[in-house]
Amino acid sequence: MGEFLSAPVKDKHSEEGENNLVRYASCGMQGWRKRMEDSHIADLNVGGTNVQCFGVFDGHGGKEVAQWVKKKFCEELSKNKNFKSQNYQKALFENFMRMDAMMQENTGKVELKEEAKKAKLEDEKMNKGSDKNKNEMFKSLFDPKSQDDCDVALYTGCTATVCLIDDKKAYFANAGDSRIIICKNGVAYAMTVDHKPDLDEEKTRIYKADGWVIEGRVKGKFFT
């Protein structure tokens, strides 16, 4: 999610592929947002194995984390001990936590800063020559992500909804309000539960951490 345009960008970016087990297709559109902040993965042989991984990462507050997770998720998953021992359900859970931990490490912070610089350059190129350019330049001066000492992950984030498939089963993991469904004979079946603050379990966790939920948001704010 992010700032809105006066008219939607309707260009589609599609991708497809297949192996002897699955065939996939993906399509992304920027829409009304100022920039495309979402990313996805479609890896047909994670770490050289016969395991497929598909995921969608919906950027919140910017594209930086969504792009960073796209680059890191399968790479780190293939290193996971439980993945190597074919305990895929636990490996997915641990890899979600691993992404969070890596963003707090020095290397992760530097890499996210690089993503922020790329996003800023793309914005400047997009606004070059437009009447909005001066306003955008002025706003960028106060953008915390443009400051040298900024921890980018505190200002932007992403949802993550991932499906892992081996030759026997499909495994699902979800954080945020992206969603996985399976369609069979024209009927859609939800494989994930939207991860929102007003879920009883999540609301309990928030209140135990001295927070609260107002109008479906933590402390009335939109967190990334």
Image: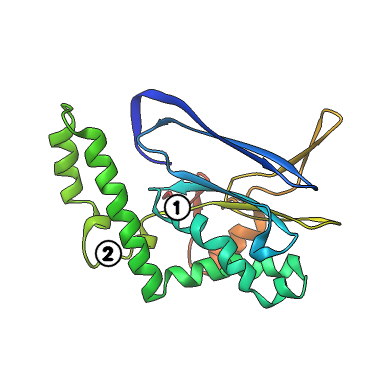
Q: Is residue 132 or residue 177 the one in the foreground? A: 132
As shown in the figure, which amino acid type bears the numbered disc 2?
Cys
Q: Is residue 224 left or right of residue 73?
A: left
Which numbered disc flags the more N-terminal residue, 1 or 2? Answer: 1
Q: Is residue 84 above or below residue 132?
A: below
Residue 135: give x, y in percent of width and height.
16, 36
Residue 26: give x, y in percent of width and height.
61, 37
Q: Quadrant of residue 68?
A: bottom left
The quadrant of the picture occupied by the N terminus is top left
Q: Is residue 57 left or right of residue 48?
A: left
Q: Quadrant of residue 81?
A: bottom right
In this picture the colour scheme is: rainbow
Label 1 element class = helix
Camera-side mark, 1 or 2: 1
As shown in the figure, which amino acid type bears the numbered disc 1?
Gln
Q: Is residue 111 or residue 24 the one in the foreground? A: 24
For marks 1 and 2, give the CA distance.
18 Å
For mark 1, what is the residue? 67
- Count of numbered circles in the view: 2
Which residue is at a point 69% across and 40% down the rendered structure image? Answer: 24
Q: Is residue 182 left or right of residue 131?
A: right
10 Å crowding of disc 2: few (<14), some (14-19), many (20+):
some
Q: Which mark is residue 143?
A: none
For mark 2, what is the residue? 150
10 Å crowding of disc 1: few (<14), some (14-19), many (20+):
many
Residue 20: give x, y in percent of width and height.
79, 47
The answer to whether one can see residue 224 in this image is no
Q: Is residue 120 or residue 79 the one in the foreground? A: 79
Asked if marks 1 and 2 touch (Cβ < 8 Å), the reply is no
Which residue is at a point 50% across and 46% down the rendered structure image? Answer: 39
